[in-house]
Amino acid sequence: MALYSEKVMDHFRNPRNVGIIEDANGIGEVGNAKCGDIMKMYLKIEDDVIQDVKFETFGCGSAIASSSMATELIKGKPVADAMRLTNQAVAEALDGLPDYKMHCSVLAEEAIQSALEDYRKRNA
Ligand code: FES
């Protein structure tokens, strides 16, 4: 069996929603101290809905695929749904990740939570 699913390879080769949002109202950046990978997430939220989301990831293929899939899972969704997004859901949507690559999907979950937290602070 191949190490990575077709979906992982697809999102790694053709990542969705790469880039920055100039007028984002929620920005989060997280890193993994062990591997040194960094992920930055930009959210444009209006009426409690994620109207747009983009990311920049300096990291491994699984981190890029996880960021790409995570943005697809929350785009157009209510903020409350995005808050519930787990790294397991991201990994499942990618048809799985090898055990030792699960931390890459954690980075995606953390980046989104960090951007949502930033949004919450700005609107407090
Ligand atoms: Fe660090 Fe994948 S190896 S996020």
Image (tube, helix red, strand yellow):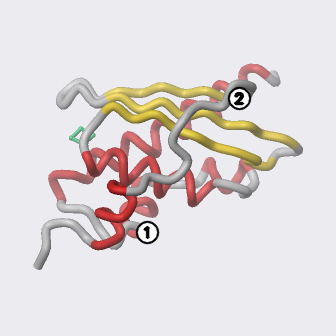
Please report the residue visible at 41 percent of the width from the left and 32 percent of the height from the top: 39
Q: Which residue is mark 2?
A: 24
Residue 28 in the image: state x and y as whole percent: 54, 27
Kind of residue at badge 2: Ala
* Horizontal side, residue 24 vs residue 54: left or right: right
Q: CA distance from mark 1 to mark 2?
A: 26 Å
Up/down of 23 relative to 65, above or below: above
Query: How many C-alpha atoms fall within 10 Å of the one at disc 2: few (<14), some, or many (≥20)?
Result: some
In the picture, which quadrant includes the N terminus?
bottom left
Under mark 1, the amino acid is Ala
Q: Nearer the viewer, residue 20 or 94?
A: 20
Quadrant hosting residue 54: top right
SS assignment at label 2: loop
Label 1 SS: helix
Residue at left offset 62%, top offset 48%: 83
* Residue drawn at point x = 18 percent, y = 28 percent: 34
Q: Residue 88, how many percent across, how many down?
A: 39, 60
| Residue for badge 1 | 93
Q: Position of residue 123 (x, y in %)?
A: 81, 24
Q: Position of residue 8 (x, y in %)?
A: 32, 63
Q: Quadrant of ligand 1?
A: top left
- Numbered circle sitting on residue 106: none
